[in-house]
Structure formats: C-alpha cells, structure tokens
Amino acid sequence: MRHRLKRAELRVLLACLAAALVLAQVAAAPRAPRRRPGGRRWEPVLTIGQDAPDAELPRLAFEKTKDGGVIGRVSNEKVKLSSVWTKKPVCLFMSSYT
Amino acid sequence: MQALYEAYKDKVAFFFVYVREAHPVKQGKEGGAEGRSPKDIAQTQSLAERAMAATDCLKALKVTIPVLIDTMDGKTEKGYGGHPAGTAVIDRDGRIGFTSRGPNGIKPEGAEKVLKELLANKGKLGADVPRPKETSRAAADRPTKR
C-alpha cells in the first residue's frame, strides 16, 4: 500500500531541504584567512597584469679586505629595472636580514 | 630562492633587493657585543650601512643572487610591497606576473610556476591576462589636481 505524504510531513521535508541548501552554501563560501587577534593582513600592493613600477637601484659590489675577508659596498653602477625586463623576465626577491 | 636562481639564471634576470630591516634593534644594541646575535641590526641609516647589512645577510643565507640596494625612501619596497619580504615576477612588457608580500613573502614556488609560463610564451604574459584599467605607471603619470 502506497504511503502518501501528509501535508505536515511535506512541510518538514521541505524545511530540511532548505536547511541543507543553506548549510551547503555556507560551507562552499570562500573564507577569509584566519589571523591572530591584532594580526595584520598583507594585502598585495600590485595586481596581476598591472604595469610594474620602475626603479633605478645601485648594485651591491664586493671588495676583498686586507685580512682576506669580503666587504660589501654600494656600487656606482645602477640597474634600471625597465631596461632589464625588455630583454628577459625579471624576478625580484625583497627582504632584509632581520 | 637560490635553487630557483641556479635553475633559471640564464633566462631570467634575478635580483635580491635589500630593503629596510623588518625587526631592527635599538641603536647601540647591535650584534657583536656579549650575548647578542650578529643578526641584531639597528635600522640602517644610509646606503653604506644597508650594504654592510646586506653582505652579512648574503653570507648567512649563502645566496649568490645579484643584490640591489633599495633607496633610503623605500621606493621599491613601497612600489612592490616588499616589506618585510616580498616576491615579484615581471614579464618582458613590464607587467606583473606574480606578486606576494608579508613575513613569508619570499615565494620561489609561486614565482617558478609563473616563470615557466612566461618562458613558454616568449617571456610575456598570456593574452588571457587582462590589463587592469588603471595601472601604477598610468596613475603616476597622471597630473595631480590642484
């Protein structure tokens, strides 16, 4: 004998389906990366496809010291990034010791 | 970083741009004194000081990438978001192909992926990469309103 859904059962079923849909949407939504309280978000300064800022920077040159060590000094030779990237792609790593 | 440089140095121009110190100690508390680390560096006040700090950094990290010294006004770190650390890949049209910044901003893996794509396309970004409406150079060239 076929069981017919009563109106009340149908309502419960529809409510469950709606709740499942909402939960699925929440689970699929992109989440902001977790960060510690007071932590800083490092938003990118540049976007992909954007023109890169040009800069002309001095090279680090090395000289040998009398005791056989090596010391770095600011060279008079400067590198203009735009004159380099026309010849080949450029990869910059920016950092400091600390 | 060094491995990426060794692998692609003939086809790609690599530069390590030494920017201002991310975690400087106070003046007079620099390394070398008893109980202090050689990594205790006060904020550099001149390009010469920055060159010395860069030399120590290269020795410690055993990096042979050509080094450029950022200007004292931080033109590169501000333009590229290179502080405290960052990576940027630029194509032969002068467009950004990859960028990252933050305390863990050195991302050789991300850079390598983009470099492979660039080298497969004559050093240029693909036509599918749109150029943003207003670029940094365009913004810099635009006359300011008075």
Image (cartoon, coloured by chain):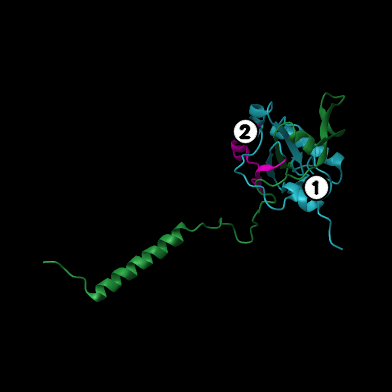
- What chain does mark 2 sit on? B
Q: Position of residue A78 (x, y in %)?
A: 84, 35
The residue wearing badge 2 is B121
The quarter of the picture where residue B10 lies is: top right
Is residue A86 placed above or below A21 in the rendered structure? above
Tell me if residue B100 is in the magenta stretch: yes
Q: Quadrant of the C terminus of chain A?
A: top right
- What residue range appears in magenta? B94-122
Q: Nearer the viewer, residue A49 or B32?
A: A49
- What chain does mark 1 sit on? B
Is residue A95 placed above or below A33 in the rendered structure? above
Identify the amino acid type marked 2: Asn
The residue wearing badge 1 is B75
Q: Which residue is located at x 87 percent, y 24 percent?
A: A66
Q: Is residue B20 left or right of B130 when viewed as pictured?
A: right
User: According to the rendering, which colour does chain B have?
Assistant: cyan
Q: Position of residue B129 (x, y in %)?
A: 62, 44
Q: Residue furthest left?
A: A1
The quarter of the picture where residue A53 lies is: top right
The residues bearing labels 2 and 1 have C-alpha atoms spaced at a distance of: 30 Å
Tell me if residue B48 is in the magenta stretch: no
Is residue B65 placed above or below B17 in the rendered structure? above
User: According to the rendering, which colour does chain A have?
Assistant: green
Identify the amino acid type marked 1: Lys
Q: Residue furthest front?
A: B127
